Amino acid sequence: TLIASCSGASNVGQAANSAMIELDSRGVGNAFCLAGVGAALSGFIESAKAADMLVIDGCHTACGRKALEKYGITPAQHFVITDMGIQKNHVYETVKDDASIVVDHINAHISRK
């Protein structure tokens, strides 16, 4: 499983990135560079195609999911942080706490293979 996050310029984007790192450290999957897909780098695209992708998007704009879908990749699992009751804003002091909520939510809802 490769884990990608949107890492956008908001609290939920940064919480997505922090959650990706924490899930990697817990062995849920391997953090993946979504920017490599956005940059159209073939190695990243092929790696994403060959893997079960878990995508964490901050909001319903779903940049992470859409970046993969541009290359025909449908994430095996997709999570949107604003669906977890966290509002999107530009206040970054709560990112660590928000990421903890995201990690707990994903751990409770992921399908493990």
Image (cartoon, rainbow, N blue to C red):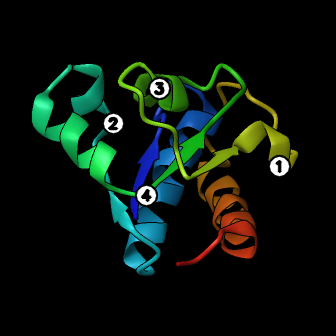
Q: Earlier in the sequence, mark 2 or mark 1?
A: 2
* Residue 29: quarter of image: bottom left
Look at the numbered discs 4 and 1 and tell me whether their residues touch, using CB distance below 8 Å: no
Between disc 1 and disc 3, the foreground one is 3
- Could you classify mark 1 by the number of other residues whose Cα lies within 10 Å: few (under 14), some (14-19), or many (20 or more)? some
Write the residue at 70% across / 41% down: 80
Q: Earlier in the sequence, mark 4 or mark 1?
A: 4
Q: Amino acid at mark 3?
A: Glu
Real-space Cα distance between discs 2 and 4? 14 Å
Q: Nearer the viewer, mark 2 or mark 1?
A: 2
Label 2 secondary element: helix
Name the residue carrying label 2. Answer: 34
- 88 shown above or below 56: above
Residue 12: horizontal and vertical position, in percent? 64, 37
N-terminal-most mark, 3 or 4: 4
Label 1: element kind: helix
Image-based side of 72 in relation to 94, left or right: left
Which residue bears the numbered disc 1?
84
4 vs 1, front mark: 4
Compare residues 54 and 51 and report the one nearer the observer: 51
